[in-house]
Image (spheres, helix red, strand yellow):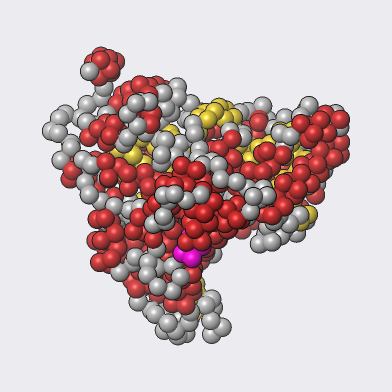
Amino acid sequence: MEAKERSCDKASQEMIELMAKAGRENAWDRLEAQSPQCGFGKQGICCRICSMGPCRITKKAPLGICGADADTIAARNLVRMIAGGAAAHSDHGRDVAHTLKMAAESDSCDYTIKDGLKLMEVAARYGIKIEGRETNEIAKDLAETMLSEFGKHEGTLISAAAYPPPARQKVWEEFGVTPRAIDREIVEIMHRTHMGVGSDYKNLMKQGIRACLADGWGGSLIATEVSDILFGSPWPIRFGTNLGVLDSEQVNIIVHGHEPTLSDIIVAVSQEPEMIKAAKDKGAKGINLSGICCTANEILMRHGIPVAGNFLQQELALMTGAVEVMLVDVQCIMPALGSLADCFHTKLITTSPKCKIAGAQHIEFHEDRAIETAREIVKMAIDNFGNRKGACHIPGVSERGIAGFNTENIFHHLGGRFRASYRPLNDNVINGRIRGAAGVVGCNNPKQVHDYGHLAMIKELIKNDVLVVSTGCSAIAAGKAGLMRPEAAAKYCGPGLAEVCEAVGIPPVLHVGSCVDNSRILTILSNVVAEGGLGEDISELPVAGAAPEWMSEKAVSIGMYFVASGVYTVIAEPLPVLGAPNLTRYLTDEMEKDVGGKWAFEADPVKAAHLMIEHIESKRDALGINKARERKLYDMEDRRALAVE
Ligand code: CUV
Ligand code: SF4
């Protein structure tokens, strides 16, 4: 297969070709080796839950040995995916909450509270007394309250009552899916899907819904809120992205994975004058830190650290031969990196006790000696600079853009400096300049042309005046394609969206962070509802979600919490349920009656964008904000007329 059929990203194509020439394999090669993939797994109708099996559903054998049918088996498999995804996000949330507790309890901790204002806001939402109290006391109470949200035995999640619109909370209450404790919902999935517990696919899905809500409005939200408190809330910031941000003349350190805790300290340590001097002593021009996947997004949002690439570029980055250290924490790290790093001087370093990889060196990271560990790792990178084998091969491809938007600052811009509220956004949606908004998020998947799904979909949406917010690897794809430059508005947007973007100087695709920061999209939607004029519930808003290249269990949990929050969500690779007709109908249709949102599967990103646009327009009709008017294409005259209005 040609490089062009694997990725639409120039830098990646160059590296894919280089790998082919050098006879080194990557995820695309392994996908070919795996093809054809198992049809039973793909359709979700293979069960390995007990040792009477494995059972798979065929015409001849429509039931497993225990009598489970296709819907039961596929539903159990799907909610177990949600358990995996929710666990990953939430365990991350737990760790940052624990770090907050450490920071609050000790003055000598390497972590401090960087955003006191956000601390107060979040503490107030969690019902913690603020007046007349020291920052550290408040932080300690907040951390402890949050930590108890994971395993408490009574009540429901505080955040599930403190953040979403009241109408949304009522939907969950009536349907019986208000999340209780974060860990509890995940454990209950594992219980309910054990051999011989429930077989009713709808009842299984109900627990999946409750668990994903505990992720989006619980574990992920805690991860985001506490990261802002500890590492500082993002603010619009310029950045560079793609493999061209690597520099052959500097010591290159790449951080990869998902958590900000160590990487944030690495940012500080890599800028220490002694470290830079040490690098220069070794003949390097300096230390060049960059990131991959969501660890990248975390330090991009807060420090403007360049992003070397997204998920499918992790192997390609090593292939440059220019990486002294690739430092990984957790999630989305390919085991393949171990043997690939061995071909170069690159040191692959694992840091979490949860994540050790064959071929990697393990330097365990503990929050109580964060700076010490970070210095050790940066020094290793510096010492490794002289060990490069042969010439580096760095593609000369990079882009620039603006990132750093969040729930609090996103519409500061729209409102101008003196009118920081969601009002201007709502007004622009109501008057139709902006038709609605879409969250385009999620991974890469070698089954799709790398980045193409994200870019084709996003371009189609903004062309039709739909504002896009993005996270994760999707945001990185958009950044690499120049869609996060403010100038992209004039080039790609419809007249209404272009006008709004140009007037306030924002790009048409807003980077709101990492995958746990999808919780920012939930809180943005809550704020839009609260601002008024667009209905009482998230399910009434002219918005839609998509993950055009998803691959991880986290993406399933994210998609499901958007759907369960009332958002129509389109993905390319279908959920593994197509062998289960009733479950498929439930997810793509009937579920909307229960929670206000539903799934759609559409492989073509442009068609998928139009499904989203149709949905947005139908919500506008329902809101009565689509005044009877001829839909027509705007020409330059119209644009000028709009601009002086
Ligand atoms: Ni979660 S978006 S591959 S890294 S989950 Fe990982 Fe962020 Fe997908 Fe990308
Ligand atoms: Fe087969 Fe039922 Fe066991 Fe699954 S739980 S492997 S369907 S017997």
Question: Does residue 103 show up magenta in the picture?
Answer: no
Q: Quadrant of the C terminus?
A: top left
499 lies above or below 55: above
Q: Residue at x 69, y 61 (%)?
A: 353
Q: Residue at x 75, y 49 (%)?
A: 373
Between residue 435 and residue 290, name the one nearer to us: 290
In this rendering, position of residue 430 left or right of residue 317: left
Which residues are the magenta region? 146-150
In this rendering, position of residue 170 left or right of residue 332: left
Horizontal and vertical percent for residue 1? 61, 43
Quadrant of residue 379 within the rendered picture: top right
Quadrant of residue 272 within the rendered picture: top right
Horizontal and vertical percent for residue 483? 47, 30
In this rendering, position of residue 62 left or right of residue 316: left
Question: Does residue 149 show up magenta in the picture?
Answer: yes
Q: Residue furthest left?
A: 628
Q: Residue at x 46, y 42 (%)?
A: 117
Between residue 623 and residue 604, name the one nearer to us: 623
Between residue 576 and residue 499, name the one nearer to us: 499
Horizontal and vertical percent for residue 378? 76, 42
Horizontal and vertical percent for residue 300? 57, 37
234 lies above or below 221: above
Q: Residue at x 40, y 35 (%)?
A: 410
Quadrant of residue 198 within the rendered picture: bottom left
285 lies above or below 581: above
